[in-house]
Image (tube, grey):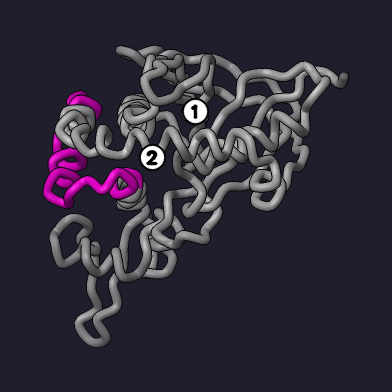
Amino acid sequence: MTSVLSSGEMSRACGLSAKALRLYHAKGLLVPAHIDPGNGYRRYTAEQVERGRTIALLRRLDMPLARIAEVVDGPIDGARERILDWWQGQLYRIDEGRDLLRRLDQRFATDNSIYNRLYSVKRRAVPERKLATMFGDVEQHDLVPRFTADVVELRGRLAAQGATFGDEFWVVYHSVVGPRIPGRIETCVPYEGKADPSGPMMLRMEPAGEIAVTAVTVRHCRYPTILGAFNAVEQDTTGEETGRPREVYPVPWSDDPDAVVAEVAITVLSRG
């Protein structure tokens, strides 16, 4: 039997506010499976949650609703290309802000009091996970669109094979990414069930271990502010052997600026 979700349950499941759900219903982008004719209450099915998650991810990029419809309603094989093609048309805005970002970057690189005020680092054990991953080289201005497109493709390929996955994904930084500095990233979606490598999707097992981690809100989950979180976990693990730093997105994106939607983490390989 298909699960039915209220508007509140749907909001919590996919990260879209009640206001956003009403808007996307009116625009035909996320139409409820059922509307009570007496009280107007909207009901959604569990199968619509992934569509809502994808919409939330793309709205982070400020993608227009018409373009989002093209992505979510089109074939999964072309979804990544449609996202990245649209983003290429937005890059003129990036050039206008690069000088400001460079100045802010310098400020955050030198003022450790900012890091200490914003970010509290904790240690946490993580279990062994099966991962579907994609690699790519990217500069800072392309980073979020690129890993967003990767997540959409990875989830689509996993779903096509019957594997299951939740909200969580993360991005591992194998080298530094910055303005005009292309770096190597690995986008990772943990999954359960059986899957085979497909197209650009590779599979690997991540071992259990310990991470140093700090939470990041929507307000601070942007460049260069988020550099403080990376600095905080690196300072906390000084003298220890560590893996590559990563941004973890354990829950759907939110339109609440104070909602915790991400973590910056680094794997602790051995004590110093």
Compared with 181, 151 (above or below) is: below
Of badges 1 and 2, nearer the viewer stands 2
Q: Tell me the residue at 49%/28% (across/down).
A: 171
Q: Tell me the residue at 15%/33% (across/down).
A: 89
Q: In the picture provided, is 71 more to the left or to the right than 195?
A: left
> What's under tag 2, amino acid-wise?
Leu
Q: Tell me the residue at 22%/66% (across/down).
A: 23
Q: Tell me the residue at 66%/44% (across/down).
A: 115
Which is more toward the observer, 98 or 86? 98
Which is more toward the observer, 4 or 224? 224
Q: What secondary structure prevails in the magenta region? A: helix
Q: Residue furthest right?
A: 272
Magenta span includes 73: yes
Point out the image quarter for the N terminus.
Answer: bottom left
Q: Quadrant of residue 180?
A: top left
Magenta span includes 34: no
Judged from the image, the secondary structure of the residue bearing numbered disc 2 is: helix
Judged from the image, the secondary structure of the residue bearing numbered disc 1 is: strand
Compared with 206, 251 (above or below) is: below
Q: Residue furthest bottom?
A: 38
Disc 1 to disc 2, C-alpha distance: 25 Å
Which residue matches tag 2? 100
Checking the image for residue 120, the label placed there is none
Range shown magenta: 57-81
Residue 18 visible here: yes
Q: Position of residue 14 (x, y in %)?
A: 40, 54
Which residue matches tag 1? 171
> What's under tag 1, amino acid-wise?
Val
